Image (cartoon, grey):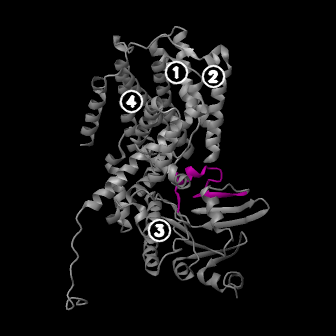
Amino acid sequence: MRRLGLAAAFVVLAAVPFFVSSTYYVNVASQILLYAIFALGVNVLVGYAGLVTLGHAGLFGIAAYTAARMLNDGHGHLSVVTGAVTLTLVAAVVFAVLALRGTGLGFVMITVALGQIVWGVAYRWLSITNGDNGITIKGRPSPFGLSLASPAAFYWATLVVFAAALVTMAVFVASPFGASLRGTRDQPRRMNALGYHVWMIRFLAILFSAFWSGVAGILYLYYNQFVSPHAVALTASAEALLMVISGGTGTLLGPVVGAALVVIVKNVASAYIERWNFVLGAIFVAIVVCMPEGLVPGTVRLTRWVAASLRPRPAARVVSPGEEGGR
Amino acid sequence: MSALAVQGLDKSFGGLRVTSAVTLSVEPGERRLIIGPNGAGKTTLFNLITGELKPDRGSITLFDQDITRVPSRRRPHLGIARTYQIITLFAGETLLRNVTLSLLGLRALRWNPFVQLARQAAVLDRAREVLASVALDHLADRPLAQTSYGERRRVEIAMALAQHPRVLLLDEPFAGLSVEERRDVLRLVTGIPRDVTIVMIEHDMDVALDFAERISVLHFGQVIVEGTRSEVVEHPRTREIYLGE
């Protein structure tokens, strides 16, 4: 039943370019999907490992910059994607080894520092990154001869990658390793006492998270055909974190809903309201107040509460005086 | 051959010496009780044995294998299991998942990200058996947070037993339990087979003295008395330090 629902959702999502007339909204949908992939990656750490990161835009950006450089150096798209993901994973190893020296706030601060180092390199190492001007690429790839130049074609390609990310994530979460990861989030000391290698579990989770962040970074580059230090800034990491928190940490659909919320407010509300940041902030405050667990788990909770309230209660049985205490 | 031997174990936190030249030898199958006033270093001793703390000096051997430098996460694989004074379980998970995590801890399956845990019948069936052994199988699918304190204590012991330990360290297993719950836990602990050596810290002397075969009294980080129940109870140092006479 659940699989049928997911398949139906996929069909509906695939039909978006047909019932959305404007290419602008198709592009917004592409952005939602690519940021959803990024948020899914961040959620592995924030939601399932309990490791709050504010440096993931660094990994996202390393993939985007690597792909941009390699494309402009004349490499083919396949080697570009492979190279960008590989370098992202290498960077993730460095991130993990350094960041896992701390826990809690220490981990957050180390990820901030690492993210800022990547941002500094992107901003200042002009010969590699072209500094503030960023890097422009010539065009999108044409896998199997299918051009992704049009908004609809790019949307469908992003949808396929998104579906792969979602399925992979669902399998990961339901696996013994996923259970181990959640265990290290809830009781690391106990997990250690049960024979688990807590550090290694977290290390592998960071690599898995970095993989999908890198994939999202490559999609970001292909979508914009441009990358600049803006993509690796602290605000980009904070936005990804907000996507996860607003949608619901440690849930499969929460980051997707959070990504949709942030992208829609950024793109749609900003067209009508100059101070759209205020709207976004107000929405986050409302979520934290009304659904502190996030939109997806909060909605589930509310739905259950409403269903329970509507269910008819059994009428109270009147106990006759003779019956009372008769046992 | 001792099941567990601790030799000259020292541990200090800054200027505070918590254990001082602690030496213990526990025979295979023995039921050893460790008693002592609060702050005597009992839980620290457990933390040293499990590797959660590194000793400043001394050695720990498990069935003649020196494990002093073995990382704490490896020690369960060698046969040490423990419970905690303050229950540290997975409150949001079901009882079944709690025990499953314990079973996975010693299996290579824990690294597998490709298969569904819900389809691992061998592990889940074993977890249900373990819960049945502590009479909690009827609550297998209930979240731990919705169980009583006594039930949680039994789950914790069940999780330790699920790993088939050779040495089981119980840190105040009766603490905070009602009279009925104590009886249940005592029945559980006394029913543990003899191939499991048990070292227990306990303050409840009524329960603990019946259980113990040998007792070590710890005071200010030192073993001051060791012997059988009657030897320890009658020893003037015990009465002076522990019983306040």
Q: Kindly check if marks 3 and 1 are in contact, taking CB atoms under 8 A apart as contact.
A: no
As measured in the structure, the alpha-carbon distance from the residue carrying label 3 to the one carrying label 1 is 50 Å
Q: Is the residue under label 3 in contact with that under label 2 (CB below 8 Å)?
A: no
**Given contact means CB atoms under 8 Å apart, are the residues at marks 2 and 1 in contact?**
no
Quadrant position of residue B128: bottom left
Q: State the residue position of label 2.
A: A122
Q: Is residue B27 left or right of residue A300?
A: right
* Structural distance between the alpha carbons of marks 4 and 1: 18 Å
- Please check the rendered image and state whether residue B63 is part of the magenta-colored stretch, yes or no: yes
Q: Which residue is mark 3?
A: B153
Q: Chain of mark 4?
A: A
Chain on which label 1 sits: A
Report the span colored magenta.
B57-82
Camera-side residue of B82 and A130? A130
Nearer to the camera, B60 or A89? A89
Residue annotated with mark 4 = A162
When asked about the image quadrant of residue B220, the answer is bottom right
Depth-wise, is mark 3 or mark 1 nearer the camera? 1
Q: Which mark is residue A84?
A: 1
- Residue at (41, 67) in percent of width and height: B147
Disc 1 residue crowd, few under 14, some 14–19, many 20+, Cα 10 Å: many
SS at badge 4: helix
Location of residue B110 with respect to A231 vertically, above or below? below
